[in-house]
Image (tube, grey):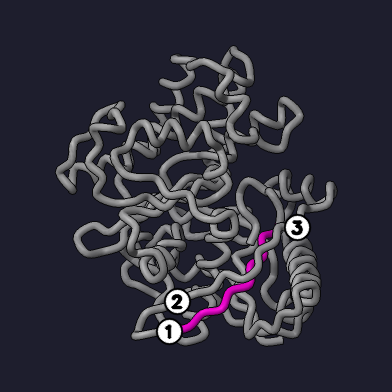
Amino acid sequence: MSGSSIDGLDMAYVEFRKEQNRWQYDLLVGETVEYSEKWLQTLQNIRSFSSDELKTLHVRFGTLMGEQVRQFIKKHHLKPDLIASHGHTVFHNPAKGYTFQLGDGQAIANTTRLTTVADFRIKDITLGGQGAPLVPIGDELLFDEYKACINLGGIANISFKHNQQRVAFDVCPANQLLNFLSNKKGFDYDKDGNLASRGVLMEPLYQKLSEDPFYLKPFPKSLSNEYIAEHFIPIIDAASGTVEDKLHTVILHIADQLHKAITFLQKRDDIYSAPVVHRELRTIKGELLVTGGGARNRFLISELDDLTTYRITVPSPLLIDYKEALVFALMGVLKINGEINCLASATGASKDSSGGVIHLP
């Protein structure tokens, strides 16, 4: 898969098995291949391309993905049964009934000579859902011992059990904003949040970010790359201040929005919640599993840790970086087996479904 922060092509090799009617997994290998400068520029500017150019790139990117998978298989001496591909999201507008992930599944199948499952989102959208988030099926089947699962990717999202159902929603922009600002200092990202930790809060910027109407919508809800580019980036760009101050402010904004989502859990569990809770006074009633690139941002994790009464668990580096790829692998297995891999309680669709298109080489 390729995330919205365009870090590179994520590939993971996973073995699944069912024991006592419960899915178990072994995440054995993970690797991220950075894009060439040409492909990076293409993906950054792809929304401005014509329909003919997009169709051509769809097949070209699928072929590229297939070639990278072939090298990954050869390098690690793997024997996969199938490939599950999320692709790279270019457009996502469930209100208008469409979504588009670059990377043709048939091109992947033909290049690798392996059965490929792709295009996981569109079926849910045709059923009235958001087509996102999809990862909650993995949270439900693989990580249900955690009170909530948070992914800090280009967009931050959360999933948890509510009224015996798995609910999930996009919370706020995350690494997309942080990387956008880090690029201005010549860095791909803000390692450990070091730049952000040197800044100070810009109250006017903080307020403007918090006033976005997306935050008033009830869940399930999802954010798109286009929405972030049109509504958040211009506000940050127009604000007067240093990059460090802007990073600091965005970190506090992300932590606050996550805290508001977690507060729903805290109220439900009837435990004390306040803007800052001293650690020695905490009542811990569960753990939050935090993954995605933002889990490595120590400043962000520290700010979130100060706000929540739950214990934050940051897992192994392999799971931090490849949990989403792991879950899409599971979704491919479920699709091949004809089992549900998309939860209506998370997306708002009219019913659960088994999403994805199967491509035979």
Crowdedness of circle 1 by 10 Å Cα count: few (<14), some, many (20+)? Answer: few
Say if mark 2 contacts mark 1, CB within 8 Å. yes
Q: Specify the principal SS of the magenta part.
A: strand
In percent of the image, x 29 and y 51: which residue is there?
Answer: 286
Q: Is residue 222 left or right of residue 35?
A: left
Please rate how many residues cluster around mark 3, counting C-alpha atoms within 10 Å: few if below 14, some from 14 to 19, many from 20.
Answer: few
On residue 24, the disc is 2
Return the residue nearer the eye: 352 or 8: 8
Residue bearing the label numbered 1 = 18
Q: Residue furthest top?
A: 240
> What residue does disc 3 label?
33
Which region is colored magenta? Answer: 9-17
Labelled pair 2, 3 in contact (Cβ < 8 Å): no
Q: Residue at x 76, y 79 (%)?
A: 77
> Secondary structure beneath disc 3?
strand
In this view, the residue in front, 268 or 38, is 268
Q: Secondary structure at mark 2?
A: strand
Q: Amino acid at mark 3?
A: Val
Between 337 and 13, the residue placed more toward the observer is 13
Task: Give the mark nearest the N terminus, 2 or 1.
Answer: 1
Badge count = 3
